[in-house]
Image (cartoon, coloured by chain):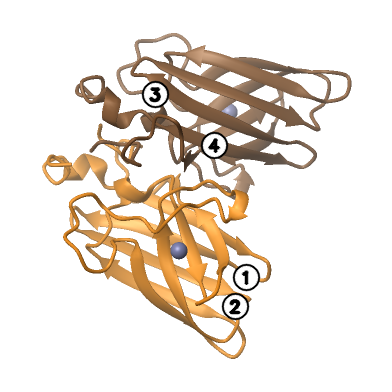
Chain colours: A brown, B orange
Amino acid sequence: MGSVTEKGPQSLGAAVSMILGDTARGVMRFVQVDPDTCVMEGTIDGLSPGAHGLFIHELGDVSRGCASCGEVFDSRGQSGGKKAGDLGLVTATEEGRAKYRLNTSRIKIWNVIGRSVVIHTAEERVACGIIARSSGLFENDKRICAC
Amino acid sequence: MGSVTEKGPQSLGAAVSMILGDTARGVMRFVQVDPDTCVMEGTIDGLSPGAHGLFIHELGDVSRGCASCGEVFDSRGQSGGKKAGDLGLVTATEEGRAKYRLNTSRIKIWNVIGRSVVIHTAEERVACGIIARSSGLFENDKRICAC
Ligand SMILES: [Zn+2]
Ligand SMILES: [Zn+2]
């Protein structure tokens, strides 16, 4: 962990998650634009109108759908408070469309690759998708993780 | 890269890939049992009878199906010869079922998480799946990558 920012330029990268649920469907894209800032952007359709939680979960295992994605991701060493993977709310329109855009220092792309995006209501996980490596503007050497 | 084996114990982990194609469907599991050995194991159904190539591709991007998974993965510093992601053949029975098991030092789990498994015929990519983090026997601290 200690050397992540030192080797930032080689670790900058991009990811994509195809999000799927019983009714919901969307795409989220991630770009680590500098060692401290991950930009997340996406559109999800087919949600119930209103607010939903957006989370990174520990695992990308969708073998039993969103149920096998594990708990909300948290970086080791995070000091109390909200978990790193708690990324706030997405609000769907009456038509069920939610747009999401976030510039965040809470997550680094190299810590979330292979994990999942999960959309929650208070009661359930309504949709999820594996966070997968994609080719990106900043991916000079085609690898996310420098280790 | 240089410090991967030194920090091996903390990097040992497990992954799963749900493989999907027009007719093919299967599951592949990965466990890094020691710093040098990744065990891969899986069953794929719905293949045409006979031999197919099994490859790790660079990207896990399935936004355009297997077409967006990029090229065959190769570790940096691999010295010539077969690419690291070229994992040999799987042979399907007359019923279209292929079982695959490999103990390999060619790939490390922390280098392939977020990438994809792709099944090839000579002509085309017939099925693919994102390699996602799963909970595993050896995953003490819930992270694959130690960086
Ligand atoms: Zn959750
Ligand atoms: Zn290929």
**Whether residue A121 is situated above or below residue A69 in the rendered picture:** above
Q: Earlier in the sequence, mark 3 or mark 4?
A: 4
- A30 vs B102, nearest the viewer: A30
Q: Nearer the viewer, mark 3 or mark 4?
A: 4
Q: Which residue corresponds to mark 2? A: B47
Instruction: Please state which of residues B102 and B50 is positioned toward the viewer in this rendering.
Output: B50
Q: CA distance from mark 3 to mark 4?
A: 14 Å
Could you tell whether A26 is left or right of B126 in the image? right
Q: Nearer the viewer, residue A10 or B19?
A: A10
**Are discs 1 and 4 located on one and the same chain?**
no
Q: Which residue is at a point 50% across and 19% down the rendered structure image?
A: A39
Q: Which mark is residue B24?
A: 1
Amino acid residing under circle 1: Ala
Hey, what amino acid is under mark 4? Val
The local secondary structure at tag 3 comes to: loop
Point out residue B96 in the picture as x, y percentages from the top left corner. 60, 82
Residue under disc 1 on the same chain as residue under disc 3: no
The residue indicated by pointer 4 is A16
Is there CB contact under 8 Å for labels 1 and 3? no
The residue indicated by pointer 3 is A108
In 3D space, how far apart are the residues under numbered discs 1 and 2 (Cα atoms)? 5 Å
Are the residues at dot 1 and dot 4 in contact (C-beta closer than 8 Å)? no
